[in-house]
Image (tube, rainbow, N blue to C red):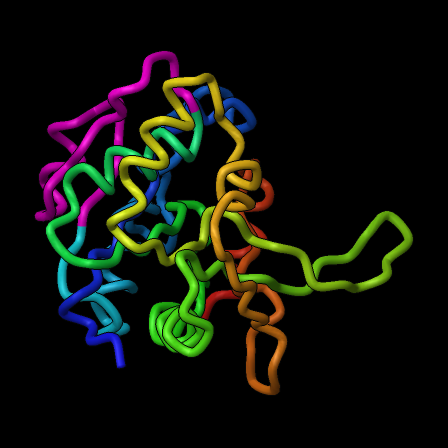
Amino acid sequence: MIDASDITGMVLSGGRGTRMGGVDKGLLLFNGVPLAQHTLQRLQSSGGVGHMLINANRHLNTYAAFGVPVVSDELADFAGPLAGFLVGLVHCNTPYLLTLPCDTPLFPLDLSSRLAAALETHQADIAMASAPEADDNGQQSLRPQPVFCLLRAELRNSLTHFTQTGGRKVGAWTAQHHTVLVPFDQAGDDPLAFFNANTPTELQQVERHSP
């Protein structure tokens, strides 16, 4: 059984925020609290991790005030989630790294424990969440949620090589390793748990849904 103390949780808040008009999305308020800070607090309250990091590339002093170490991308030009994964693996001092974005404030409180159980059961390298999403016809199907991952820290060298050779897509890298998809569509699972707020309107929508 993977113990929570062996998992470092990292909140990804290093993007450009393009669809939010270029603002630093992690600092937008959700129920009066910056999104990234809310995510950290929710992660801490879940009891699923023993350590925490935040990945940010702007307003570093503001993020540092949230009380956990801040790590910035080593890859240039806002290279995407994998840049955050990589710097997290570099600074992770535990055997496992849990990644999650700052803009999904209703993520499941049992995210870490369910990913850890699946990783161990399947002896996988990576456990990735999957959740119901509607297609253009309104049909629901399980879709991978590639930034919600539990990674073995020993994957750092693999990811370093992948990014050094120009790789930037999460799915292309995880496909190189034994990855197990973990469904979050069970009875009691919040259908909006993985809803990410990409626009101010969507942020207001998810805020109204929150407890």
Q: Nearer the viewer, residue 159 or 66?
A: 159
The picture places residue 3, in percent across and down from the top left corner, at 20, 76
Looking at this view, name the residue that lies furthest to the bottom: 187
Q: Nearer the viewer, residue 157 or 138?
A: 157
The picture places residue 143, in percent across and down from the top left corner, at 67, 57
- 181 to the left or right of 32: right
Q: Nearer the viewer, residue 191 or 8?
A: 8
Q: Quadrant of the N terminus?
A: bottom left
Instruction: Examine the rendered structure and indicate whether residue 183 appears above or below residue 127.
Output: below
The residue lying at 35 percent from left, 44 percent from top is 29
The picture places residue 76, in percent across and down from the top left corner, at 33, 13
The residue lying at 57 percent from left, 72 percent from top is 184
The residue lying at 20 percent from left, 72 percent from top is 4
Segment tinted magenta in the rendering: 53-79
Q: Which quarter of the figure has residue 151?
A: bottom left
Q: Which quarter of the figure has residue 138?
A: bottom right
The picture places residue 50, in percent across and down from the top left corner, at 14, 65
Looking at this view, name the residue that lies furthest to the right: 137
Q: Which quarter of the figure has residue 152?
A: bottom left
Q: Is 41 contained in the magenta span?
A: no
Question: Is residue 171 in sight in this rendering?
Answer: yes
The residue lying at 35 percent from left, 29 percent from top is 83
Instruction: Examine the rendered structure and indicate whether residue 71 appears above or below residue 119.
Output: above
Q: Nearer the viewer, residue 138 or 71?
A: 71
Instruction: Examine the rendered structure and indicate whether residue 31 appears above or below residue 18.
Output: below
Q: Quadrant of the C terminus?
A: bottom left
Q: Is 71 contained in the magenta span?
A: yes
